[in-house]
Image (cartoon, helix red, strand yellow):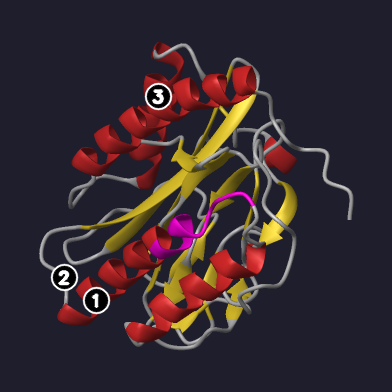
Amino acid sequence: MTFNHKKTSQEIEAMRQGGRILAEVLGALAVAVRPGITTGELNDLAHEKIIKLKAKPAFLGYQSFPASICISINNEIVHGIPGSKVVSAGDIVTLDLGVTYKGLITDSAITVAVGKISPEAQNLLKGTKSALVAGIKQVKPGNRIGDISAAIQAELTKYGLSVIHDLSGHGVGREVHEEPPIPNFGRAGTGMVLEEGMTLAIEPMASLGSKEIVLQPDGWTYTSADGSLTAQFEHTVAVTADGHRILTQ
């Protein structure tokens, strides 16, 4: 497979700047998530803050997506459309955001607890976040996509979580989704070789129950098939000469 999505050092620097904007917006949203707020209000907050920081929401209008951020609650895994849904105490809320800055896109996600959540939900968040760290550690020239995938799978399994198989990470930068796909399961030593200049959106997704997913009638929102809680954490990462650099922090 030919790979034509490697970025120049100037492009990666622009992505780093955009990633800092993204991280600032996500941080503000995480603080704003509270019982009684609607997902639509969170979307408006995200949109206004992105524009104020001289960037653009990368998801708005992407394949006709109608909002500036994806907000998924509890059993919703990804691509939840913000609207009139009200956040409640005890929920877990995934905030998945893309930002375009200087024509380049970064992508990042966090799942946040709304007040007190169950020990099982706490383990889900801790394990999924830990899997992101484990996956990122495998990013360096000469390693393979399978090394990232296997590290994520091992970490999620260690926490007793189900790995979502039908959704994956991806290349990112000039487009929202680029080659290569980055599954959250796999075998070390397999897949595409990582090279300096690649920019990857690594995003473990896990559930407390079934790994099977269902696309909802809105055509966007994926939920766990059995209604179990799900979580997602994501960073955009560049492959550098001596390892990697997280661009969305």
Quarter of the image where one finds residue 102:
top right
Nearest the eye: 41 or 156:
156
Q: CA distance from mark 2 to mark 3?
A: 29 Å
Nearest the eye: 136 or 107:
136
Image marks 1 and 2: residues in contact by CB distance under 8 Å: no
**Which quarter of the rendering shows the C terminus?**
top left
Nearest the eye: 179 or 119:
179
Residue 90 is one of the magenta-drawn residues:
no
Q: Earlier in the sequence, mark 1 or mark 2?
A: 2
Quarter of the image where one finds residue 190:
bottom right
Q: Earlier in the sequence, mark 1 or mark 3?
A: 3
Residue at left 62%, top 63%? 168
Does residue 195 appear anywhere in the picture?
Answer: yes
Judged left or right of residue 103, residue 124 is left
Q: Which mark is residue 117?
A: 2
Q: Which residue is mark 3?
A: 21
Judged left or right of residue 36, residue 86 is right
Quarter of the image where one finds residue 111:
bottom left
The picture places residue 195, in percent across and down from the top left corner, at 68, 45
Disc 3: CA contacts within 10 A as few (<14), some (14-19) or many (>=20): many
Residue at left 63%, top 79%? 187
Q: Which mark is residue 123?
A: 1
The amino acid beneath tag 1 is: Asn
The picture places residue 64, in percent across and down from the top left corner, at 71, 40
The amino acid beneath tag 2 is: Ile
Q: Earlier in the sequence, mark 2 or mark 3?
A: 3
Residue at left 89%, top 56%? 1
